[in-house]
Image (spheres, rainbow, N blue to C red):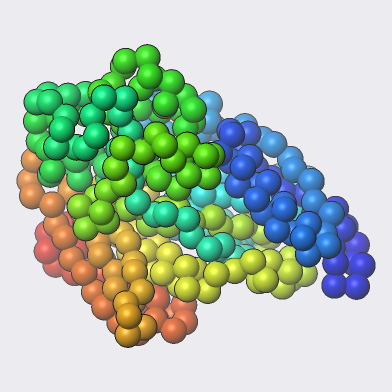
C-alpha cells in the first residue's frame, strides 16, 4: 500500500463469502472507489459459517464470524474487515479497533412466511425458525404457543429451508433482506417496541489494526456519527451485561426529536417462561463517553429489575 496524495492504493477488504457479506463488502468497496481508492476483496470462510448444526451460543458466540478476518488483518493479507455490527464481539482483541460505523439500514426484525401475513395470523403451534436466543424469548413473550425450532445458515439457506416447508415462518433481520433486494419476502417488519432488535442490528462496522492511523483517518469519511453513537450505546448494554450469542439480550437506541438518545433494553430466560425484563433510559449523548454511560445505565436498570 502506498500514498497517492490523500488516496490509498490497493486497499484489501476481508469479508465472509456469503451473498450478504459480499454485498456489504462491495458496498464499502464502491464508497471507497468513489473517493479515488483502488480496492479489492479477500473472501474468507469463517468458523461460524462452517458450524451449521449447533447454535452459536453453544460453540463460541459472535467471535466465530470475525476471527478469520482478524487473522487476515494481523498477517497483512487484508487492510480492513467489513462486518455486520451485530456479529462483532463487544470487546475486540488487543490491537484492533472499529474505525467507523456506516449509516444504518432498517434495524428491525422481519417475519417471513409463504402463507401467513403476521405473527397473529400463525395458527396455534405453528413452527417458527430462529436460533437467536433474543428472538426466542421475545417470540415466546408474544406467542407462547408457537413451536420455535433452530435455524442456521446464511440468509439464502434460511429462505430455502422455509420454502421447502420446514417452517411456517422464520424471523430475519430486515436489513439483510433489503440489501439483497428481497424486501418483497417481508410479511411484516416488527415494531421495535414489539420485537426489540439486537445491539448493532442493521449497521455495518469496519475493523482495522489499531496502528493503521492512515486507514482510520480515511474511513472517517464513511462514518455516520449519529448511528455510531446510538450503536455504541447499544453495545455498551451488551458489554456491561457480558452479552454474546449466549445471552438473550436486546438493546435498541433511538434519537428523540429534542436530540436526546433513548435506549430500550430487554432480557429474558430461554429456559422458562418468566416475564421479560424491560427497561429504558434517556440522556444526552453527544460523544462516546456519554453514549457508553447511557448503555451502562440501561444495563444497571436491567440487573436491578432481575436480569442476570
**Residue 246 visible (yes or no):** no
Q: Residue at x 92, y 67 (%)?
A: 4
Q: Is residue 85 above or below residue 295?
A: above
Measuring 24% from the left and 34% from the top, which residue is drawn there? 117
- Image coordinates for residue 157, horizontal then vertical, percent: 47, 24
Rendering coords of residue 237 (x, y %): 33, 64
Could you say where residue 104 lies in the image, as x and y percent from the top left? 48, 60
Residue sitting at x 40%, y 62%: 235
Q: Is residue 37 visible?
A: yes
Q: Nearest the camera: 11 or 57?
A: 11
Residue 156 falls left or right of residue 187: right
Residue at 59% x, 69% y is: 223
Image quadrant where residue 215 sits: bottom right
As rendered, which of 241 and 141 lies closer to the eye? 141
- On screen, residue 199 above or below 171: below
Q: How many marks?
A: 0
Horizontal and vertical percent for residue 169?
A: 28, 28
Name the image quarter holding residue 46. Answer: top right
Q: Nearer the viewer, residue 279 or 39?
A: 39
Amino acid at each position: 500500500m502506498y500514498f497517492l496524495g490523500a488516496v490509498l492504493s490497493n486497499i484489501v477488504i476481508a469479508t465472509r463469502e456469503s451473498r450478504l457479506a459480499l454485498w456489504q463488502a462491495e458496498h464499502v468497496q464502491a464508497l471507497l472507489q468513489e473517493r479515488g481508492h483502488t480496492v479489492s476483496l479477500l473472501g474468507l470462510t469463517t468458523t461460524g459459517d462452517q458450524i451449521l448444526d449447533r447454535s452459536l451460543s453453544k460453540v463460541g458466540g459472535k467471535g466465530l464470524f470475525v476471527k478469520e478476518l482478524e487473522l487476515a488483518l494481523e498477517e497483512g493479507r487484508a487492510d480492513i474487515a467489513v462486518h455486520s455490527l451485530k456479529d462483532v464481539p463487544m470487546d475486540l482483541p488487543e490491537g484492533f479497533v472499529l474505525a467507523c460505523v456506516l449509516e444504518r439500514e432498517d434495524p428491525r426484525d422481519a417475519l417471513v412466511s409463504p402463507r401467513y401475513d403476521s405473527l397473529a395470523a400463525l395458527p396455534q403451534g405453528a413452527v417458527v425458525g430462529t436460533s437467536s436466543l433474543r428472538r426466542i424469548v421475545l417470540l415466546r413473550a408474544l406467542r407462547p404457543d408457537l413451536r420455535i425450532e433452530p435455524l442456521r445458515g446464511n440468509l439464502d439457506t434460511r429462505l430455502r429451508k422455509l420454502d421447502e416447508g420446514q417452517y411456517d415462518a422464520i424471523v430475519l433481520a430486515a436489513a439483510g433482506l433489503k440489501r439483497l433486494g428481497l424486501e418483497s419476502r417481508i410479511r411484516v417488519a416488527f415494531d421495535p417496541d414489539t420485537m426489540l432488535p439486537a445491539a448493532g442490528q442493521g449497521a455495518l462496522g469496519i475493523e482495522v489494526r489499531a496502528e493503521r492511523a492512515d486507514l482510520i483517518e480515511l474511513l472517517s469519511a464513511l462514518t455516520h456519527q449519529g448511528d455510531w453513537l446510538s450503536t455504541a450505546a447499544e453495545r455498551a448494554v451488551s458489554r456491561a451485561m457480558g452479552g454474546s450469542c449466549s445471552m438473550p439480550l436486546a438493546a435498541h437506541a433511538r434519537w428523540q426529536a429534542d436530540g436526546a438518545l433513548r435506549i430500550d433494553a430487554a432480557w429474558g430466560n430461554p429456559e422458562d417462561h418468566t416475564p421479560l425484563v424491560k427497561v429504558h433510559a434517556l440522556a444526552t449523548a453527544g460523544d462516546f463517553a456519554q453514549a457508553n454511560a447511557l448503555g451502562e445505565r440501561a444495563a444497571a436498570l436491567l440487573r436491578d429489575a432481575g436480569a442476570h
